[in-house]
Amino acid sequence: MPSEFTVRVNGALVSVSAGATVAVAMVIAGQPCRNSVMGEPRGPLCGMGICFECRAVVNGIPHSRTCQLLCEPDMEVKTDE
Amino acid sequence: MNNYSREQFDVLVVGGGPAGIAAAVRAAESGVRVGVVDENVVPGGQIWRGGPSEGPHSSDASSWLLRLKKAGVIVLCGKRVFHHPEAGVIMAEGLDDVWELSYRNLVLATGARERFLPFPGWTLPNVMGAGGLQALVKSGLPAQGKRVVVAGTGPLLLAVAAYLRQHGAEIPLICEQTSWRRLARFGMSLMSHPGKITQGLQLKRDIAGVPFEANSWIIAAHGEKALEGVTVSHAGRTGVIKCDYLACGFHLVPNTELAILLGCRTRNGYVQVNDLQQTTVEGILCAGEPTGIGGVDLALIEGQIAGLAATGRTSEAQALFPKRERFRRFARLLDATFCLRSELRSLPSPDTLICRCEDVPYSRLREHTSWRSAKLHTRCGMGPCQGRICGPATQFLFKWNPDSVRPPLFPARVELLAAQPQSIPEVTGEIQ
Amino acid sequence: MSKETYDVVIVGAGIVGAACADVFATRGLRVVVVDRDVVGSGATAAGMGHIVVMDDSDAQFALTNYSQRLWHELRPDLPEDVEYEQSGTIWVGADEEEMAEVHRKREYYQKRGVAVEVMDVCHLKEAEPNLRDGLAGGLLVPGDAVLYPPCAARFLITRAQQRGAKLRLGASVVQISEGSVRLSDGQEVAGGIIVNAAGANAAELTAGIDVKKRKGHLVITDRYPGFLRHQLVELGYLKSAHSVSRDSVAFNVQPRRTGQILIGSSRQYGAEHKEVDQVMLARMVRRAQEYMPALGSMSAVRVWTGFRAATPDKLPLIGPCPGYKSVFLATGHEGLGITTSLGTAKLLVDQVTGSKPEIAVEPYLPSRTAKEYAHA
Ligand SMILES: Cc1cc2nc3c(=O)[nH]c(=O)nc-3n(C[C@H](O)[C@H](O)[C@H](O)COP(=O)(O)OP(=O)(O)OC[C@H]3O[C@@H](n4cnc5c(N)ncnc54)[C@H](O)[C@@H]3O)c2cc1C
Ligand SMILES: Cc1cc2nc3c(=O)[nH]c(=O)nc-3n(C[C@H](O)[C@H](O)[C@H](O)COP(=O)(O)OP(=O)(O)OC[C@H]3O[C@@H](n4cnc5c(N)ncnc54)[C@H](O)[C@@H]3O)c2cc1C
Ligand code: FES
């Protein structure tokens, strides 16, 4: 894997270093990971797989915990609605 | 189901933090088959997860990680234990695999998580845990040039502030809710823990010049779509500070859910163990934070005792008791110093969300008299975090006691619940 | 210790006790509801909340159909958190044999004025694209609904309280006797009549009634809005649920308003403990995956169990308790108590007040079983 590569977050390209989690890519992109039940934007809270606030759609799979998932080149990430 | 694997161990350790590593290393000295399962991609737990190069414990970290490598322990990383389908068996889920792990002895070293307390605005993006933000930076989030307010309570705040600063962040303020009086008493008591002093001095150097306030806490976080600033209360006065991130955690809560699922008794929220770190369930031991929040040194000692006890080396275990007692005193000191002040109970406003998974506001919870009642009627704690965030918060806010624990321990793929344990094939003896 | 006195003492604040409290209070009686736990915490917390018309027997049909009508009438008053949704049921036919059952059922329902629609396989696929290929068709019952039982129970209790009923939670009844109940702290609560609505625990309080625990498992997933639209039940369910002695599982899935999916169901006798039984759970989940393979990769948030109060003829016990003058039963609702709670309450109050019930009460009178057992 290259040391720097891009992933797509809600359509926009974000550059990350190898080893970065998907949650990191979303925070860098300034995009919420999910919209809550009442529609509030949410981002990571615990960073350790406990709170489930960082759930997003990763390569089409909803409710993926992005803080526990490493970025891969050309990953497609979207806010979980 | 794809990628279904079975493994059998004499000693199986859940959790690859300091306690788990120490337990596995000591158990493996007896030549028995030892496994460690941890949900993170690398062993190390909360403190060593960034690799051995980080933080004030680096020498300890590298020596223990090296010992783990050399001990012939089977390390299963990226697998989260989610189920206990029958006696002597637990199941772990990976990204695309599932493991049925059976054991003679089980050591629970599941560590702790941060406690979060609700205040207006705490659900805004970029309001994170103190350890939470640290974990994100460890996994690649640039901190360079960011303004980060660090708040809450506990020794973690200083460690995080120091870490963030090393990574280029600007820390306009550290807010510690406890009083100067308590901190002073804590400082005095540290005299009897020389190791802690050196760690403390190192930290102090790392955060020299960073404003630190005791008797101080966040009363609100502001922002349109994400955090823009916070209102801080300090000694009866309030002020607004602009920032990019808020790193806010209120000390730690033990991860006791697996122990409870396995039937181990708890006392005052911690897993009950005897001198040899044995729980009330035969063959199950527990070490590290779940038996009491005591930090890395206590975790290492307890882990060793558990590893030795699990392999019948009782007298060697006993030799470590005095050391453990010293670190336990430190744990009690932590508890006393960083206990939560009652003002924090009045922070939520009626519309502040308490359950973040299900968006349940404070006003709806107030009507209830127990966690179970609130859960059934408001869905509080029914979301995917299964009450791990709002449970400790409501325990503090309303003095509610948590409910029973049911599988899956963490949300898991539906198909994994259909797995049926079979008789385990003979041990292959293959060590990875 | 002073003795409190009421017209009606209801033991149990599950959906059945709650519905009874609501109806008795509406008729102007002074009511107290006593529960050892919180409102709706027994089977009511465990149930699926499917409001369904069933035709195992004419009597079952009559009670479920009557009760469903009452739910429809109540609908405008139900608060948001009851999550009442008329999603309809599709009885799924896997093969020609089950399609024969679809047609039989259609005829039975239509004759009695319940709207139904037979679906061929294309229709079925269109309505529920996530069902597996190769099924034969189904029967749509559009009037069936789904709700969230604990909040429904709470709504009924709250309404009863507004009408003067009292609620005593955290009070365990240790004995029911003529005209009074005794609590674990020794206190007595007296009533002109006592209603045993203690669900699967009812037999512990009034001896001699045949109510057994029938354990069930359920799984709930994270939110997947749009994945499932109707409650789906396999028709093979009839084969398995009919058996009153063997453990069984069936494909039975429910869309929640939240977008979550509730996956059921299992039936098990003789299992007294609440712990999840891995063998039953595995069988149940496999059955669900056979019908809906995509369920497998969904995130399961929680698994739980509950106890249905089962009677030998699968009909509830509504009416005077044999051997007592002032004690009445409202239990034995097996897997239909959420649905039939409203009908149960009406039939009970009619008996107590001597009003004419809207449907015949005889099939549900507790005395029937006493007779039947004498013959058996
Ligand atoms: C977020 C956070 C940040 C921290 N940062 C610092 C710091 O900077 N400096 C400092 O001195 N101390 C820090 N601490 C405290 C420090 O982690 C502890 O003192 C020490 O690591 C305790 O060791 P342990 O082995 O008991 O637990 P941990 O190190 O927490 O190890 C427990 C391990 O078990 C794993 N686990 C838990 N449940 C399961 C399961 N079901 N399946 C699989 N794996 C599981 C966890 O993921 C974790 O890797 C931090 C604690 C937390 C919670
Ligand atoms: C898995 C499962 C799925 C189901 N799905 C459906 C469905 O889809 N549709 C449907 O209509 N029905 C369904 N049911 C059935 C339905 O849940 C029950 O029939 C219904 O909840 C029964 O209500 P109840 O009030 O009689 O009993 P419960 O809800 O059990 O209430 C009894 C109450 O009595 C209290 N109590 C017991 N003993 C004492 C005592 N000694 N002192 C004081 N209080 C006492 C308990 O605390 C409890 O609150 C299902 C049941 C299960 C288990
Ligand atoms: S940030 Fe909490 S689970 Fe990912």
Image: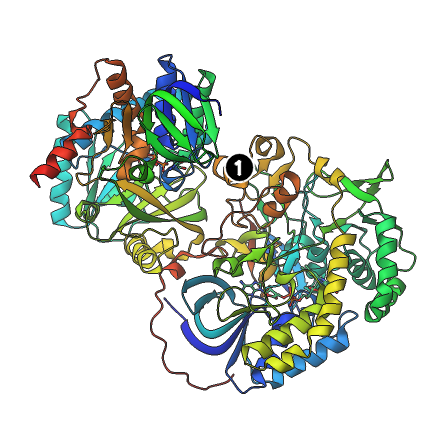
Residue that numbered label 1 is attached to: B374
Quadrant containing the N terminus of chain B in the rendered view: bottom left
Q: How many neighbours does mark 1 have within 10 angstroms: few (below 14), some (14-19), or many (20 or more)? A: many
Q: Is residue B259 above or below residue B297?
A: above
Q: Quadrant of residue B209?
A: bottom right
Query: Would residue B73 be found to the left or right of residue B153 on screen?
Result: left
Q: Is residue C351 visible?
A: yes
Secondary structure of the residue carrying numbered label 1: helix
- Residue B418: x and y, percent? 35, 60
Look at 68% across and 60% down and name the residue there: B293
At 62% from the left edge and 40% from the top edge, which residue is drawn? B354
Residue B313 in the image: state x and y as whole percent.
Answer: 58, 82
**Is residue B341 positioned above or below B74 on the image?**
above
Image: C118 above or below A25: above
Residue B61 placement, left or right of C372 = right
Residue B253, image x and y in percent?
65, 55
Q: Is mark 1 within 8 Å of ligand 2?
A: no
Mark 1 is on which residue type? Ala
Q: For this rendering, which residue is in front, A3 or C135?
A: C135
Q: Residue furthest left?
A: C375
Q: Position of residue C178 (x, y in %)?
A: 30, 25
Residue lying at the far front of the rendered structure:
C1
Q: Is residue A19 visible?
A: no
Describe residue C42's horizontal placement relative to residue B207 as left or right: left
